[in-house]
Image (cartoon, rainbow, N blue to C red):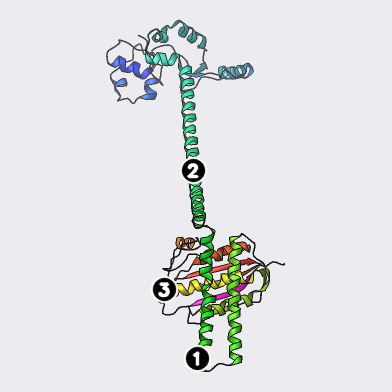
Amino acid sequence: MFLDSGSHNVLASLLRGEGDVATVPSCFLEDNYPEAHPFRKDLKAINVLESKPCVRSTPAYPNWAFSSSPGTSPEVARDVLKTLLDMPTDSKGYRWSIATNFSGTDQLYKDLKEGMYIILNEWSLKTFFKEYKPWFFSLTVLLICLAGYSALLNYLVRKKTRQLQRSIKHQQVLQKRSRDSEAKFESLQKLGIIGQMSSMIAHELRQPLSTLRLYAQGLQRKLERGEWSIEQSSEVLSKIVTQAERAEQIVQSVRNYAKSKRSEKQEICLTEIVNNALYAFKQSGRFRRNVIVSIAEDIRLFANPMEFELAILNLLRNSADSLASLNHKDPKIELAVRRNGDFAEIEVKDNGAKVSEADLQAAVVPLRSSKENGLGIGLSLVNNIMENHGGSLVLHARKGGGVTAVLSLRILER
């Protein structure tokens, strides 16, 4: 009975009584088991010829075999063989020889499916796997590659999907901005040219007309009291003429806007324009305290003086109205003029109520006002004036409350 499972299983089979006698290599028992082990205690060696150093029942066979790898050159194998055969026997009885190459015999048994290969005649999953092992290996590698390729495709699809989703969201944001911009323009288109002109005239003519009324009433009272004099009357009439001319300029400017005409620009002194706006603002009586003014240097610009004065005046009015609606205990309005590189900046800030960024963006939309009786044209007009001059209007919400408005215009030669 041939067992293709090693000498350990041969001894175990003999111990179980499955055979009468078994053959194992010499020194196998001594090298692998202690004396008290059942293999050495319960099994008996027969036909013992020698017991030192190992028990053996046959003539002495070399118990150390040397073999060479298939790639060894014949010259090296011959020299090693000669050296081994010339060496004397070991004093302990160990011997050696050259192993015989049984690969051809083994292949013959395998091809005939005999001997230890008789199992190949019986079909089983193990034999099937052993027979087609290269194919199984190739199929496994192919499946692993397909799985990796599928995982890579899934990763790339998810990545592209995320990119597409981000692009769609970005496009939706742009479309929303476009719709918001169209809505802003539609709000002006619905009113038409006549509505724009009437609103702007009503907004800007209030100041000069109020001043005209005050001067006329003052002159009338002096006449009624008999305090009339040529010098005083001449001065008052001169101021009335100035305000009338200002009103006429406003009307003409509004007509130019309606006809899409470019405003007439000239070289102006920014300090003079700021002082004119401050004077008109003080005459309006909207703010009883002094405006804190800071002018770093005299800057000369190329702009329309009346429009630029209107822009500054509207910012001052907005600050005053914000403080008045809040009933602030310590209201402050600060106006600063400075040079920032190639730009002139006019900054107007107040300590009014806290506002959000959304409110500031809505403030420049035409015909939208947070004031009870406001026309919603002030900051929109300022923004249009700055755009027509190639400048900008920027609004910032202050942390402690209030708004900072900055007019910025490049300093240009004619």
Q: From this viewpoint, which residue is outermost toward the right?
A: 414
Q: Please provide the residue range marked out in magenta.
A: 326-340
Q: Quadrant of residue 116?
A: top left
Q: Disc 3 or disc 2, which is closer to the eye?
A: 3
Q: CA distance from mark 3 to mark 2?
A: 44 Å
Q: 356 or 275, which lies in front?
A: 275
Mark 2, residue position: 168
Q: Disc 1 to disc 2, how far (Cα)?
A: 76 Å
The amino acid sitting under disc 1 is Glu
Q: Nearer the viewer, mark 1 or mark 3?
A: 1
Instruction: Kindly state the secondary structure of the residue where label 3 is placed.
Output: helix
Q: Residue at x 60, y 80 (%)?
A: 241
The vertical placement of 225 against 251, above or below, is: below
Comes first in the chain, label 1 or label 3: 1
Q: Nearer the viewer, mark 1 or mark 2?
A: 1
Identify which residue, 164 or 290, lies in the foreground.
Answer: 290
Percent position of residue 245, x then y = 61, 75
> Which label is found at residue 325?
3
**Crowding at mark 1 (Cα within 10 Å: few <14, some 14-19, many 20+):** few
Q: Which residue is mark 1?
A: 224
Viewer can see residue 395: no
Image quadrant holding the N terminus, namely: top left
Under circle 1, the secondary element is: helix
